[in-house]
Structure formats: C-alpha cells, structure tokens
Image (tube, grey):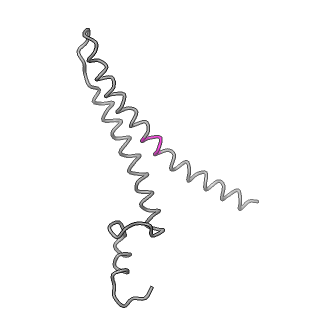
Amino acid sequence: MLMNTKIVFSRFIAIIVLVIPGLMAMKGFLMMKDALFLYYAEHGNDMISPGFQWLSFLGGLLLFVAGMSFLGGWILFRDRKRNYVGPRFRSKKQTEQLETPGSSS
C-alpha cells in the first residue's frame, strides 16, 4: 500500500510540474491578446488617443515563451529517451553510435 501511494504521489507531482508551465503559457497568451484587443478597441473611440500596452504585451510574451520552451524541452527530452525523434534531434552520442560502422547494438 505504501509503494502504491508513493507512485500516485510522484505522478501527481509530475503532472503539477507540467501544468504550471502550461498555465504560464496560457496566461502569457491571454495577456498578449488583451493588449492587442484593447489597442484595436481604442481606435473606435474618438475621445481618447490609443496607446499600446507594451509592458503587458512583453510580460505576456515572456510568460508564453518560458512556458512553451519548458513544455517543448520536456517533450523533446522524453522523445529522445524513447528514440522517437528524427536524426536531426538526436543527441550527439546517440548519433555517433548509429553512424559508427561495424558496431553491434
């Protein structure tokens, strides 16, 4: 029973580690979308001069890039470990082992 609890807890932690960067990327995308939408929405109002929210947009871009980079790196690491990637994305050691003639694997 204790071993089963450890496995469930470790999988829960792994899911949380993947959900947090996903939420970061989602929040960044929404921040960028809101900055663009408000800029275009202000063009319809003649009472104000439209201004772009650069800080909000750049903060959203930073969150989006950080979250997606983490998720992309995790997927690449997992696929390299399971040998699902093409020759371009294989690690250097793995590529050398595959190209060495006369080696048995």
Q: Residue at x 67, y 58 (%)?
A: 6
Q: Residue furthest right?
A: 1
Residue 31 position within the rendered picture, expressed as x and y whole percent measured from the top left:
38, 32
Residue at the left extreme?
49
Res 90 → quadrant:
bottom left
Give x and y (percent) for residue 82.
Answer: 48, 68
Q: Quadrant of the C terminus?
A: bottom left
Residue 62 x %, y %: 34, 41
The correct choice, above or below, for 46 with respect to 56 in the image is above
Residue drawn 71% across the image and 59% down it: 4
Residue 66, position as x, y percentages in the image: 38, 46
Please determine whether, in this image, residue 78 is positioned above or below residue 44: below
Q: Residue at x 49, y 44 (%)?
A: 20
Pick the residue in front: 94 or 13. 94
The number of numbered discs placed on residues in the rendered structure image is 0
Name the quarter where the N terminus is drawn. bottom right
Q: Nearer the viewer, residue 12 or 29?
A: 29
State the residue lying farthest toward the top: 47
**Left or right, 50 with reference to 34:** left
Q: Quadrant of residue 83?
A: bottom left
Magenta stretch bounds: 21-25
Q: Main secondary structure of the magenta part?
A: helix
At a point 34% along the width and 79% down the height, the residue shown is 96
Find out whether residue 84 is within the magenta segment: no
